[in-house]
Image: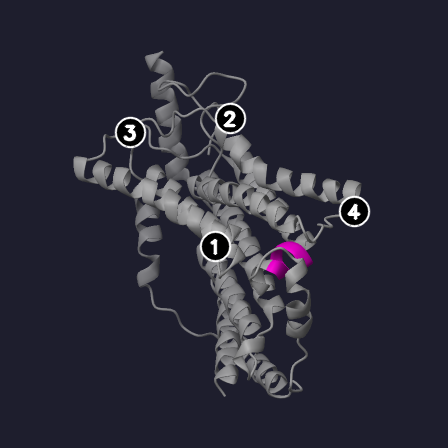
Amino acid sequence: MTNLLYSFTGLILFIFGFFALIVCAQPLRKILGCNVMATGIFLFLVATSYRADAAAIDPVPQAMVLTGIVVSVSVTAVALVLATSIRQASDPFIARRKKKAKGDARKKQ
Amino acid sequence: MVRRNEAKMNNRHQTKKRLSGLLWTLLLLTIFLAGLLIWTVLNIPRPLPSLSRETAEYLAMSGVNNPVTAVLLNFRGYDTMLEVMVFLLGAMTVWSITHAPFPARVANPSPVQATAVRLLTPLVCLIGGYLIWQGAYQTGGAFQGGAVLSAGVVLLLISDFIWVPRMHSLPLRLGMAVGPLLFVILAIWGVITEGSLLKLSPENAWAYLLFLEAGCGISIGLTLAAFFAGGRPLGDLREEPYKADQDDGEEG
């Protein structure tokens, strides 16, 4: 019974993340939605490695979850840096302040 | 006019959202998808097929005593090799976008912070190394130890030390590359000695895997910290290390 509880929790997390990915407009919330989806899937995978006799757990889904966590960290990092650079390139306030700082540095030389 | 735009962007989280018809349709479709998935999970045929018997059978040949580490590094070592390459590829992508955004004026850390970091960093190295080593016997291994090591490097990054942005970047690059390089060398060594990619002989596998885990742990720690720094290091390999009045030459 506890096995089903963990599987359903992973599934509900996946659905929450899926909804947030589609509905939210800001890029950071979409990235967080992807992360929540990934966490739900990892929980579901680990729950499938449970066996009734505790001596014989299945180690293969746990190894797959380790690989999945590492890949999701890489994807989150790349997505966050891309979102930051998009925001900096498209925000007039930040671009103006950066141009002023560059102009000051050039005037100082 | 710039100030009014900025005020509107800052207050956006305070405006009330009304659920439109499209949002209701999406919500109902998502609930339907959730119901479908729950029905699928309830109808999975039990008992689930499992590989625990085969893993226990071949565990003695794998060179480690923990079934998860054996599956990760030996039986499915090819997946782990590709995963470590994906990690390095993510770091290359992050580095190709921007320089690491260190603040222009670096303040000296307070004595409390400096002492805490000086006390914690050797402990982090010790615990990370222990986790990497104990992966052969209990839960642990390269990824877990690498995460602890990366926490130590992130502590150094956020503590406002003056010398951190000005470090030469060659040790960082070598450290990040040592994990994938060791995997590739081990794969080719498997071809040379046993005839198949990543094939480790059962009596020497423990030594190969310990070496591999150490290298991968260091490289995972440095790569995770590079992800946190958010861009390439300020000193390029062609030029000299970063000086205070050097300009980027590019935006973002």
Q: Is residue B24 visible?
A: no
The alpha-carbon separation of the residues under discs 1 and 3 comes to 39 Å
Residue B72 covered by magenta stretch: yes
Q: Amino acid at mark 4?
A: Glu
Residue under label 1, please give it: B134
Looking at the picture, how far across and down is residue B42, in whole percent? 60, 87
The picture places residue B70, in percent across and down from the top left corner, at 61, 59
Q: Which residue is mark 4?
A: B194
Q: CA distance from mark 1 to mark 4?
A: 27 Å
Question: Residue extending furthest front?
Answer: B203
Q: Earlier in the sequence, mark 4 or mark 3?
A: 3
Tag 3: residue type?
Val
The residue mark sitting in front, 1 or 3, is 1
Q: Is residue B84 covered in magenta?
A: no
**Disc sitting over residue B170 in the figure:** 2
| Chain ID at mark 3 | B
Q: Residue B129 location in percent, x, y?
A: 44, 46
**What chain does mark 4 sit on?**
B
